[in-house]
Amino acid sequence: MTTKIETILDRAMCGYDLSPEEGVILLKQNNPDAIALIRNTADQLRLSQAGSTVTYVVNRNINFTNICEQHCSFCAFRRDQGEPGAYWLDSAEILSKATNGVERGATEICMQGGLNLQAKLNGKSLPYYLRLLETINQKFPDLHLHAFSPQEVQFIAREDDLSYAEVIAALRDAGVDSMPGTAAEVLDDDVRRILCPEKINTATWLEIVSTAHQLGVPTTSTMLSGHIETPEQQMQHLNELRSLQQTALNRSYPAKITEFILLPFVGQEAPKPLRRRVGRDQPVLADALLLTAVARIFLGRWIPNHQPSWVKLGLDGATQALTWGCNDIGGTLMEEHITTMAGAKGGTCMEVETLQAAISCLNRPYQQRDTLYRPLEARMQNAKC
Ligand code: SF4
């Protein structure tokens, strides 16, 4: 078996794209020697595709409401209107959070929320979302607004009877600089029927993200792993992302996918049926690291930036992921509700110095970046471990 693994990994090192079937073979390894080879290949490819520097972004999350019409089976964040814990931030609260972010050095606001049917202006959804952007943009025109998932785009389009292109163009013109590639979960409709039956299906997610690229709006890409999905479905997901990026690059779209983020499932506070089915509350680090490595090997030629989630894995787990193919440690966030309400132990805020120290422990240099992976300081810094 090791010989077969070596052949697959040699081909990857020579710059060939692996097939999803080859990816499945890698994911099914449990021999420590084979796993060490996979990790080593991912680490070497990370070095050649993204360099030795580990990047981070200073950003602030704003989840403007947790009132949501949907009932995803993994979601501990959503509430019905009027239910204990339901919230909906007004413009003053949003501005105050953005101001706090700027005072703490944020270059990016990441804004997403539940699908709140009441969130309308004059009976329309799009003007409400435009006002959210305007609230921040008027005071902080230089802040990068990373906002609204493909699911939110579809929600606005449905409520206002608009096309996806009309919604994305309006959001872009009002200040959206890039879109989170969230709501992807696993891009397999059998999984989606169980995980998020009311969400957009795989084809719609891909259509909306591709439309964003065509309209000049870069996106990230994500995967919610470690619940009910099989290795075959994991590779199908990565294959969809790779094809999407190949389309953007081959057709010279004005924007593309900027990064891949693995989001291992945290079930502690998730609704009981899925929690019971998955059978554990916290991610299995070994599984997340192997998938991190395979994602680098499979996607890295097309999507060179890979980020672990310190919220899901904890900072120690995320730091380990930097030796399994990741080149970025993510953002400071400053406030995180969605995963923390699901029972994640990684925390809600990370100081820059803490991220720098974690990176320094690996003897790798660090560099602050903006959302689009442009370096923000010419000089590398050093922090004590
Ligand atoms: S994951 Fe998003 S869409 Fe699904 S229930 Fe939670 S807030 Fe709503």
Image (tube, rainbow, N blue to C red):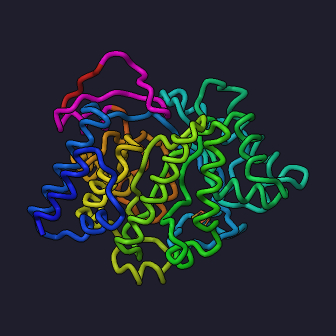
Q: Nearer the viewer, residue 269 or 219?
A: 219
Q: Is residue 142 left or right of residue 10?
A: right
In magenta, the rendered stretch is 353-379
The percent coordinates of residue 241 (x first, y second) are 48, 54
Residue at 27% of width from left, 66% of height from top?
27
The quadrant of the picture occupied by the N terminus is bottom left
Q: Is residue 187 magenta?
A: no
The percent coordinates of residue 99 (x first, y second) are 60, 31
The percent coordinates of residue 327 (x first, y second) are 31, 40
* Residue at far top of view: 378
Residue at 27% of width from left, 32% of height from top?
51
Q: Nearer the viewer, residue 125 or 81?
A: 125
Q: Is residue 10 above or below residue 331?
A: below
Q: Is residue 84 left or right of residue 1?
A: right
* Residue at far left of view: 33
Q: Nearer the viewer, residue 20 or 257?
A: 20
Residue at 43% of width from left, 66% of height from top?
236
The quadrant of the picture occupied by the C terminus is top left
